[in-house]
Image (cartoon, rainbow, N blue to C red):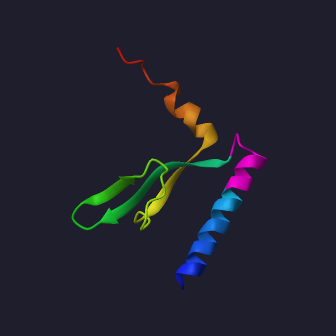
Amino acid sequence: MSDVVKTLRRRIAEWMRNKADRVDRTSGPRAIGAHFNFVTGKGLVITKTDGIPIHPPAPGCPLWYMSEDYDRAFADMEPRS
């Protein structure tokens, strides 16, 4: 597949994701700004991008979380002293 087609598909996917977030911002998935990949000899490797597009794109799959899970994840945390 040519680079032009890949870039076009990526931009369409980003546009659709942004539109979906606007429809229901409270329940749509959100990007964490990291990718994960399995590397032989290392196991699971997470590449943190902080949401900044990097070129070439980070290897692996982007990590996402569901909006309603964010508050639940921190509800039982103890405050730091």
- Residue 20 drawn at (x, y percent): 73, 54
Would you place residue 27 above or below residue 63 in this image? Answer: above
Would you place residue 21 above or below residue 11 in this image? Answer: above
In magenta segment, residue 78:
no
Task: Tell me if 72 is positioned left or right of 48 in this view.
Answer: right
Considering every residue shown, the one lying at the far right of the view is 23
Depth order, front residue of 71/49: 49
The N terminus lies in quadrant: bottom right
The C terminus lies in quadrant: top left
Task: Tell me if 70 is positioned left or right of 41 in this view.
Answer: right
Considering every residue shown, the one lying at the far top of the view is 81
Would you place residue 60 above or below residue 7 in this image? Answer: above
Considering every residue shown, the one lying at the far left of the view is 41
Q: Residue at x 42, y 18 (%)?
A: 79
- Residue 6 drawn at (x, y percent): 56, 76
Task: Tell me if 66 is positioned left or right of 53 in this view.
Answer: right
In magenta segment, residue 23:
yes
Q: Residue at x 40, y 58 (%)?
A: 36
* Magenta stretch, main secondary structure class: helix
Magenta extent: 18-27
Q: Residue at x 41, y 63 (%)?
A: 58
- Residue 41 drawn at (x, y percent): 21, 64
Total numbered circles: 0
Would you place residue 32 above or below residue 3 in this image? Answer: above
- Residue 21 drawn at (x, y percent): 70, 49
Q: Quadrant of residue 59?
A: bottom left
Depth order, front residue of 40/25: 25
Task: Tell me if 80 is positioned left or right of 67 in this view.
Answer: left
